[in-house]
Amino acid sequence: MQRRRHLSVFNEGPGAVTVLIGDEKLQIDESGGTVLLDYGCTPGDVTVELEAGDVVVVDGPVCPDEEILIRDGEVTLEPAETGRGPRPAAART
């Protein structure tokens, strides 16, 4: 089985978010998402800036076997291939 190498971020919450991954600054609209092709693991933590102004930091590295899911002000990591439920991943700062 070939290992997944793409990193996915999905925003299912109200409002747009900004996601900082390494040198990448991603703007993701409400009900939007993005996939970083052939990205591999993040070089460190992932920072999510919510539209309301809250900042959530996900401990890194985050690897392609997990998806970053933003929903109702919460950020979780969810298994990318199995689709099982999310697990807590972040602390609000």
Image (cartoon, rainbow, N blue to C red):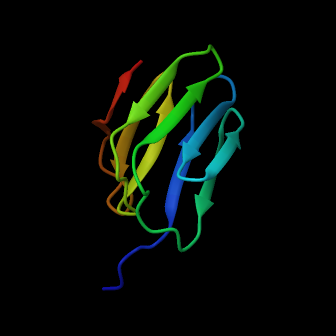
| Residue closer to the observer: 75 or 93 | 93
| Residue closer to the observer: 59 or 31 | 59
Image side of residue 41 versus residue 20, left or right: left
Residue 13 seen by the camera: no
Quadrant, the C terminus: top left
Residue 67, image x, y percentages: 43, 52
Quadrant, the N terminus: bottom left
Residue 35, image x, y percentages: 59, 60
Residue 15, image x, y percentages: 68, 24
Image side of residue 67 versus residue 19, left or right: left
Image side of residue 16 versus residue 37, left or right: right
- At x 50%, y 29%, the residue is 71
Q: Is residue 91 above or below residue 18?
A: above
Image side of residue 67 versus residue 26, left or right: left
Residue 57, image x, y percentages: 42, 32
- At x 69%, y 29%, the residue is 16
Q: Is residue 57 above or below residue 77?
A: above
Q: Residue furthest bottom?
A: 1
Q: Is residue 20 above or below residue 14?
A: below
Residue 5 seen by the camera: yes
Q: How many marks?
A: 0
